[in-house]
Image (spheres, rainbow, N blue to C red):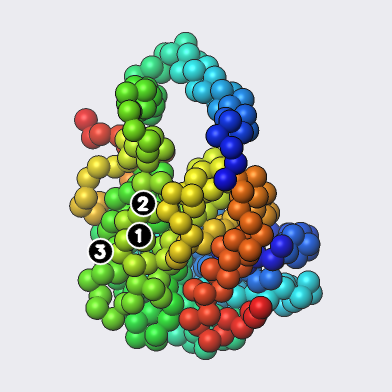
Amino acid sequence: MPAPDDIVDRGFLEARGKLLEVAAFLDRAERYGRADDYRVAALKQAMRELCDAKQVGRAEAFLRAMSDPTSEPAPQAGKPAAGAWEPKG
Amino acid sequence: MRYIEPHAHMVSRVTDDYERLVLAGCRAVCEPAFWAGFDRSSPQGFYDYYLQLTEYEPRRAAKYHLPHFCWLCINPKEAEDVGFAREVMALIPEFLPKDNVLGIGEIGLNKNTRSELRILEEHIDLAAQHDQLILVHTPHLEDKLKGTRLILSALQSDSRIKPERVIIDHVEEHTVREVLDAGFWAGITLYPVSKCTPARAADILEMHGRERLWVNSACDWGPSDPLAVPKLAMELRARGFSEAELDDFLFKNPCRFLSQCDKFNVTE
Ligand SMILES: [Zn+2]
């Protein structure tokens, strides 16, 4: 296993860059009037939950938060997977 | 370094990719039947595809001395029309005795529909009848968790299916534990955006161990990287994995699973 310091050295700048991209994406979506898109809303909700998470397992929690929570097979195929679950209004 | 690429759609790749795989240390490539990026309009289209997987691709790979194996099925994305899917499935038994066929795959679910589930169950039955290994595709993105659970229950409700003869592919952090705990093999797919990165795959390995786990590039016609597995090896080295551990995970693990089919004759 690498030393604990090394794991941060190796990953920090990349993680920082990716989070900055997320921040810019959310700004961009709002600037274009798409703040209420279900995918944008799902991303914001997931980010709130990640900040609250006290324990490890954030990647798993993020994926669960973006997942279809239902359990019955669908009557037919709808639109292709988009990356976030859209609650039926 | 030597490794097995257990999931690659070589029909969609250029011949140079075979050379690059071999140069990177690949000792065998395995190709599940999949969706070609468009819906085929007739069972004859699938017949030709099965010929391509069992005759043409092994010859193309052999020019680079790379053993090529394949899996056969109609993929879930084309299983929405149950009647059509059954016509295609009726072609499969003719191809199962071919030298490079390892089993039935990649079956599974795409949008978790009733029709997909029915065809999945019929594929499981086909595999059981012909005593074949099974390779399962799990759905994409938000559909993966629900689909993985539906797939697990379909497999578990057929008492003829032995979990150690089934690999459930494209697991991520939220599905890997349920698959392994049920006794199945699990596959991690390395994709640039929509599946696992090398760093996350290494995390999964650190947290869940490498028993009954393999990794693949699933390279196809979309954004994907045929050299994703050797790139994961670089990440694992940086995490302190030894060369013996890399060999055990990237070469021996796929061999352990695939050698359950006599035709997989890749040796040490
Ligand atoms: Zn595939």
Mark 3 or 2: the one toward you = 2
- Specify the quadrant of the image occupied by residue B251: bottom right
The kind of residue tagged 3 is Ser
In the image, taking residue B223 as reference, residue B88 lies left or right, namely left
Q: Residue B149 in the image: x percent, y percent? A: 28, 56
Under circle 3, the secondary element is helix
**Mark 3 vs ligand 1: CB under 8 Å?**
no
Q: What residue does disc 1 label?
A: B179
The kind of residue tagged 1 is Val
Q: What residue does disc 3 label?
A: B153
- Specify the quadrant of the image occupied by residue B81: bottom left
**Mark 1 vs ligand 1: CB under 8 Å?**
no
**Frontmost residue, B190 versus B2:** B2
Ranked by sequence position, the earlier of labels 1 and 3 is 3
Q: CA distance from mark 1 to mark 3?
A: 11 Å
The kind of residue tagged 2 is Thr
Q: Quick check: B158 above or below A60?
A: below
Q: Residue at the spot x=22%, y=71% of the render?
A: B157
Q: Residue A79 in the image: x percent, y percent? A: 37, 43
Point out which mark residue B175 bears. Answer: 2
Q: Residue B192 in the image: x percent, y percent? A: 58, 43
Q: Residues within 10 Å of mark 3 (few under 14, many from 20)?
A: few
**Frontmost residue, A74 versus A20:** A20
Q: Which of the chains bears the disc numbered 2? A: B
Q: CA distance from mark 1 to mark 2?
A: 7 Å
Q: Quick check: B215 above or below B262?
A: above
